[in-house]
Amino acid sequence: LVEEYFENSLQTLDFCTALEKCLKRARDSQLLILVALQLFDEEDGIEGNRYTRTLGELKNFKAFGDPFTEEFFQNFQSVYRQQLLMLEKLQLRRNKLDKKLKGIHAWRKVSSIIFAATFAAVLICSVVAAAMAAPPVAAAIAAATAIPLGSMGKWIDSLLKNYEIAVKGQREVISSMQVGTYVAIKDLDNIRVLIDRFEIEIESLFQNADFIINEEAVKIGIDEIKKKLGVFMKNVEDLGVQADMCSRDIRRARTVVLQRIIKHPNH
């Protein structure tokens, strides 16, 4: 399960790298729009101008296409499903360890009761022996029997205690992986929301570009693009921040899990 966790986290880091590449393309798209707006300002007001350069740059923007490819979305779905499945597996493992710990606690109580009762029985026998035989003989019987019983009781309790410590160590490792996986899922959820917003905004910009190119309503279309460009740029910026956060969270979680494993090597 630990190996699977680290493999999944590596794949999620690869996804973050793919996201960064898409964001670079998104920034390139943004640059094409800014160039188109600059060219419009240069061409506007010139008598008889057909906004040739502005239209050319908008066509480049359209041809550049959506920075987020179908392959990227498939990669996202794959990574997201893996993280959900990992969280489910970790919860099942955590439940088993919790049950195991309860069992160990119960056995420690039972063993202490058994050995306490046995020790009491030995004392009773020594009292009976004292009543029926010489006191030195009874004392010898009690001492000879009680010492091994006490040692055995401590030995068994020591074994159970060591086992309990090992299981708690496993649970600590599992808990750290649960936290890391949960945070990764939340980061991916935030990324998905931002990408959905980005897709809406870029589709709207594509429609405006089409309107300008096909209807030659340059001024109206450019005004619409100017209104929407700020939101588009903010989406790109927010996605960049979230991508960085996702990468940092995953690396931090991997470090924490490794520290837990080093602390409890018998994971």
Image (cartoon, rainbow, N blue to C red):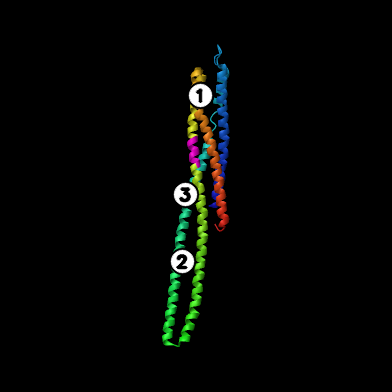
> Is there any visible trace of residue 230 in the rendered image?
yes
Disc 1, SS: helix
Find disc 3 in the rendering and name its residue. 88
Q: Residue at x 47, y 86 (%)?
A: 137
Which secondary structure is most common in the magenta stretch? helix
What is the x, y in percent for residue 203? 49, 28
Q: Which quarter of the picture shows residue 243?
A: top right
- Residue 188 falls inside the magenta stretch: yes
Work out whether mark 2 precedes mark 1 in sequence or the reverse, and give the earlier one: 2
Find disc 1 in the rendering and name its residue. 226
- Residue 86 falls inside the magenta stretch: no
Disc 3, SS: helix
Disc 3 crowd, CA 10 A, few/some/many (<14, 14-19, 20+): few
Marker disc for residue 108:
2
Of labels 2 and 1, the one closer to you: 1
What is the x, y in percent for residue 162? 52, 64
Which stretch did the figure color magenta? 187-194
- Residue kind at label 3, given as amino acid type: Glu
Disc 2, SS: helix
Work out whether mark 2 precedes mark 3 in sequence or the reverse, and give the earlier one: 3
Pick the front one: 242 or 73: 242
Q: CA distance from mark 2 to mark 1?
A: 73 Å
Q: CA distance from mark 2 to mark 3?
A: 31 Å
Pick the front one: 170 or 240: 240
Q: CA distance from mark 3 to mark 1?
A: 46 Å
- Residue kind at label 1, given as amino acid type: Lys
What is the x, y in percent for residue 86? 50, 48
Q: Residue at x 49, y 51 (%)?
A: 90
Disc 2 crowd, CA 10 A, few/some/many (<14, 14-19, 20+): some
